[in-house]
Amino acid sequence: MFTQDKRSVLPVGPRTGRTYPPDLLPRLQALLADLADIEFAYEKNVDALQRSPSDATLKREMLDRLRLHHEKRRALALAELALLEEQVRVFCEIEA
């Protein structure tokens, strides 16, 4: 059903589709790819370290450093994802 005023023709009723900003999908894909890369690199480094002949104490210290580095990188990516999510939420509220 449509209603018309002097300015525009607008659909009235439930929306059948939502249009998002054109850069949304590429940004989301890039962030998810970054998260996957972060996880993969961490698992690869942990695996390599665990298989190394290094001293157990040294391994633990290096694993702790790896974990902290991983957590920092992951937190930055998740913060960006949260910002993107907030932008989408605001956009959807404006469009509603």
Image (cartoon, rainbow, N blue to C red):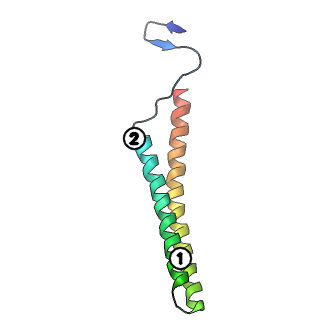
Give the side of residue 49 with respect to residue 21, left or right. right
Mark 2 residue element: loop
Give the x, y percent position of residue 72: 53, 67
Q: Residue furthest bottom?
A: 55
Query: Which residue is painted at 56% across and 74% down in the image?
Result: 67
Amino acid marked by disc 2: Asp
Considering the image in quadrants, where does the C terminus appear?
A: top right
| Sequence-wise first label, 2 or 1 | 2
Q: Which mark is residue 47?
A: 1
Which of discs 2 and 1 lies nearer the camera? The answer is: 1
Total labels drawn: 2
* Other-residue count near label 2 (Cα within 10 Å), few / some / many at <14 / 14–19 / ≥20: few
From the viewer's side, name the closer residue of 86 and 37: 37
**Amino acid found under the numbered disc labelled 1:** Asp
In the rendered image, residue 52, in percent from the top left (x then y), is placed at: 51, 86
Mark 2 to mark 1: distance in Å? 36 Å
Quadrant, the N terminus: top right
Q: Residue at x 51, y 49 (%)?
A: 83
Vertical order, 21 against 17 (above or below): below
Vertical placement of residue 59 versus 77, above or below:
below
* Lateral position of residue 17 relative to residue 21, left or right: right
Q: Residue furthest front?
A: 51
According to the picture, the residue beneath numbered tag 2 turns out to be 23
